[in-house]
Image: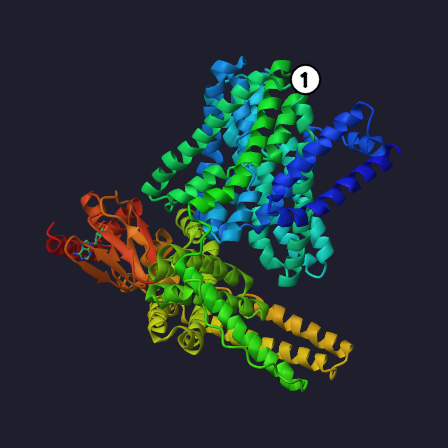
Amino acid sequence: MHGVVLTVFAVSLLLALVSLLPPLSARLNIPYAVLLAVAGCALGGLGVLAGSGAGGEVGAALRSIHLNSDAFLFIFLPTLLFETAINVDVRRLFDEIASILLLAVVAVVVSAFAVGFALWPLAGVGLAACLMLGAILATTDPVAVVAIFRDIGAPRRLSILVEGESLFNDAAAIVLFGLLTAILTGAESAGPVAGVIAFLRSFLGGLALGAVAGALACAVLPIFREHPLAAMTMTIALAYLAFVIGDHDLHVSGVVAAVSAGLVLGDAGRRRLSPSNWERLAESWEQLGFWASSLIFLLAAMLVPRLLADLRLADLGLLAVLIAGAFAARAATLFGLMPLLSWAGLAERVGAPYKLVILWGGMRGAVSLALALAATENDALPPEIRRFVAILATGFVLFTLFVNAPSLRALMRALRLDRLSPAEQALRDRALALAQAEIDEGIARIAHDYGIAAAPAAAPRRVGDGTGGEDALLRPEARAYAGLVILADREQELYLEHFDGRTVSRDAVADLLSDVGRLHDGIKTGGRDGYLRAAASGLQFGWKFRLALWVHHVAGSAAPLARQLARRFEMLVALRLVLEDLAGFNEAKVRPLFGEETAAVLRDALAVRRADTARAAEAVRLQYPSYTEALERQFLALSALRLEDESQRRLREEAILSQEVFNHLQRELGRRRRALERRPRLDLGLSRADLVARVAMFARLSPALQGEITRLLRPRLAVPGEIILRRGERGDAMYFISSGAVEVRLDDRTVALGSGEFFGELALLDDRPRNADVVALGYSQLLLLRRPDFERVMRRDESLRAHVHAVARERRGTAGN
Ligand code: CMP
């Protein structure tokens, strides 16, 4: 065999091997990554032997696979990262963004420096080479850890942290590696400031490129609605184009570009394809991701024998120092820096057992090996550096694979993280009992239908016998816990039903589903209170909303804000409906299972949520009554379509409709649905003239003066709870309330102001800092008058001036100023 045939043969052999490993790993209970590494090293050894003449055709085939580091990075990395990125829950990622960036960027630098300085005095190579080794070993491989987390049912939050870390730390490490290589080969001069600037340019540039590419892809995605195969092809092109254009043409980080394109597509693109097409796309990517991660690992492991070829005893000493340094650096970040984030209010606390797991679970994998290979192939680097990097990087990767990975479970057991809590045991037992009851019922029905004599009824199984679960279930908190989990599961199911029936838009469902994820975490960490805290945070305005609000304040543009508000309003409508359903579910299902006491706890919790949601929805209705009505009408119309769809399908199944007629009806239905699905546009009602006309103080003025003032005023929407002015700030504008209400929070009391009134004038008149916080009570349309314009307006009309001064005088008096 020669050339292409040989390569095809070799790749097929590898795929055959890869296909056998997952079942083997399940049977032997050894992490898949470890098996891959073993297989890869063995094959690599075979290849080396074959190099000396032995091995025949297989040996020749193995030798024929010659991948250099570029091939590794360019062929496999985009797929690997893109696949993880499209599946990440972006909202949750942003919730944890401070911790993730700390782990992914700061920790990479800390680790590079710790390793660098620990090895430098001993290694006999320069500091830059030691730093480079540190950078290579800063990329973590999350696969094994995340699989274990999933097994033991650790909070989703932990997987998000670990996955988010690995998404971005590959990028950070590769950028740092590139910089250090450039310094070592003399292509760039050293210097910390230049390094930081180059790093930021590469990272942020990659982020921006990926976001733009992802947004473009999302924009064209709807044309692929009926063409799932083409859609998949387009997304592959996206991943690789972002990577290559970033890396080669724009000289920003291609890795970051691929990740950020994947995040944008996963977040926004998902809503532009039909659910089933998205599902298909995700499955295809899963398959690609599996191939990429397996092959990159296997191929990288095959290099190990070559990289370790001239291992010396002294290297083992260096390896020990390296291991100590790398783990100490990771521990310092986790235990030293992470608490600072929660202390500063930037991130939620992560408990010590979990930190230990993240520390010990920081496996290094294929990316580290590929980078080590890149260093060994680089002829511009002195040979002793190449040897140093190859041996130590490989040694460290093997250490994490053969020591950390297999012992992670034991560690988790020692930390008791693998155990179900008593409440979870109770939940499991209940679930088993429920399932058993359903099975019994089903069997009885089948026996009856087919006239089979039913087996003598098995003695009714007592739930939790011998497992301690029953005792646990008797405890009210345990029952409440189990009830809340069931409630959150049901909530998720209801959203998915709405999603399937397409009565609620994908945007809203995506938001709501990620809120359910938070509910689960909340229950795990804080029971009922945690559940309610998570529910309350779901009602708060998220980062996208705040960004839109900021754009509105700074640039005056209202369109993004209107979109965000419309999305929120729709979410509220759906949430209210689902909460109603849940209240019914609690009475009908939870109460019979868990008793009145538990049902009462859930009832109360649901009542709190319903009240909060109703309040939020009411605030909308007050300001935008016709919009709320339009949304509710839309929901009804979509529900009608869903029923119609179901009846058509039933008729088709019963063969009353021919396939042709059915297709025709479905097309027709699809057309009507598309027209209906467009969310009604929300008019924020911020037309200046209208707002001015509603303020009595201006209505009295002459039309000419009114026109002049109208030009100077800027419309501004404030949302409930928004702090419009803060005490102590310098004042540069005053506000008129055109509609809505605000609350002035003084030292000893609060004063509500409504339509037609104004605030923020004292700071301008007295040239002093703001004397109170002013907070919006509902959606409030305000008119803002800036300081220079304020003075002009005051000069133009005496009556206006007198009025403002009189009110200010009164406020100074009552406020005790
Ligand atoms: P300023 O000090 O600029 O910012 C806070 C604003 O709260 C202040 O202007 C007034 O507009 C308003 N404010 C202060 N005291 C009172 C009060 N007693 N009654 C109503 N509004 C007040």
Q: Nearer the viewer, residue 329 or 189?
A: 329
Q: Where residue 702 sits in the image (x, y, percent)?
A: 30, 61
Give the residue at x 66% y 71%: 671
Q: Residues within 10 Å of mark 1 (few under 14, many from 20)?
A: few
Q: Is mark 1 within 8 Å of ligand 1?
A: no
**Three-letter amino acid code of the residue under disc 1:** Asp
Q: Where residue 817 sits in the image (x, y, percent)?
A: 12, 49
What residue is disc 1 on? Answer: 379
Callout 1: SS? loop
Give the residue at x 69% y 82%: 651
Q: Where residue 31 sits in the image (x, y, percent)?
A: 59, 44
> Is 735 above or below relative to 778?
above
Q: Quadrant of residue 609?
A: bottom left
Give the residue at x 46% y 45%: 412
**Horizontal arrangement in the rendering, residue 456 relative to residue 744 (left or right):** right
Q: Nearer the viewer, residue 264 or 593?
A: 593
Q: Nearer the viewer, residue 485 or 777?
A: 485
User: Is any atom of residue 302 visible in this view?
Assistant: yes
Report the quarter where the N terminus lies: top right
User: Is any atom of residue 242 visible in this view?
Assistant: no
> Is 159 above or below relative to 569?
above
> Is 99 above or below relative to 681?
above
Question: How many numbered marks appear?
Answer: 1
**Horizontal arrangement in the rendering, residue 373 relative to residue 622 (left or right):** right
Q: Residue furthest top?
A: 124
